[in-house]
Image: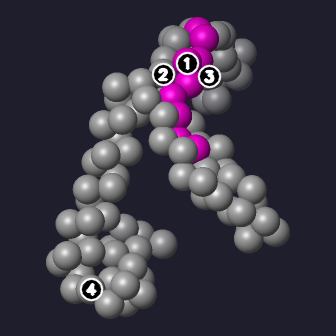
Amino acid sequence: MTKDELIEAVAAQAGTSKKETETIVNAVLDTITKTLTEGGKIALTGFGTFSVSDRAARTGVNPQHPEQKIQIPAMTVPKFKAGKSLKDAVK
C-alpha cells in the first residue's frame, strides 16, 4: 500500500475528504519523525512502538567482491516493535 492508497482508505473509513485526511496523515508522520529525531519514543497501545536504536560500527563484506571487507560506520536507526494486537491480527 502506498501513502496515497493509505490516504484514500482512511478517508473512506473516516468519511472525510482526501485533502483533510492527507493533512492528518502528514501531521502524524511528521510528529513521529520529529519525536524520533529528538531521541524520543512513541508507543501506540496494541499497535506497536516506534523508537531509535544505536548500531555499533562493524566489518562487513562487499556483496560485489565477497573477498573484500568494508567498514560499516556506527549509526542511529529507527526501530519498530509490533504490539500484541497487531501480531495477533497478522497471524
- Whether residue 69 appears in this view of the structure is no
**Corner quadrant of residue 38:** top left
Counting residues from the N terminus, which is met first, the one under dot 4 or under dot 3? 4
Please identify, in this view, whether the residue under mark 4 or under mark 1 is nearer the observer.
Answer: 4
Q: Mark 2 — residue?
A: 76
> How many angstroms separate mark 1 from mark 3 (CA)?
22 Å
Magenta residues, as a range?
A: 49-57
The disc at residue 16 is: 4
Q: Mark 3, residues whose alpha carbon is within 10 Å: few (<14), some, or many (≥20)?
A: few
**Corner quadrant of residue 72:** top right
In the rendered structure, are the residues bearing label 4 and label 3 in contact, judged by CB atoms less than 8 Å apart? no
Please identify, in this view, whether the residue under mark 4 or under mark 3 is nearer the observer.
Answer: 4
Would residue 86 be found to the left or right of residue 72 on screen? right
In the rendered structure, are the residues bearing label 2 and label 1 in contact, judged by CB atoms less than 8 Å apart? yes
Q: Say which element carries label 1.
A: strand
Counting residues from the N terminus, which is met first, the one under dot 2 or under dot 1? 1
Q: For this rendering, which residue is in front, 48 or 76?
A: 48
Q: Mark 1, residues whose alpha carbon is within 10 Å: few (<14), some, or many (≥20)?
A: few
Residue at horizontal 74 percent and vertical 70 percent from the top: 89
> How many angstroms separate mark 4 from mark 3 (CA)?
49 Å
Q: For this rendering, which residue is in front, 65 or 36?
A: 36
Amino acid type at mark 2: Thr
In the rendered structure, are the residues bearing label 4 and label 1 in contact, judged by CB atoms less than 8 Å apart? no
Q: Mark 3 — residue?
A: 62
Residue at horizontal 42 percent and vertical 24 percent from the top: 39
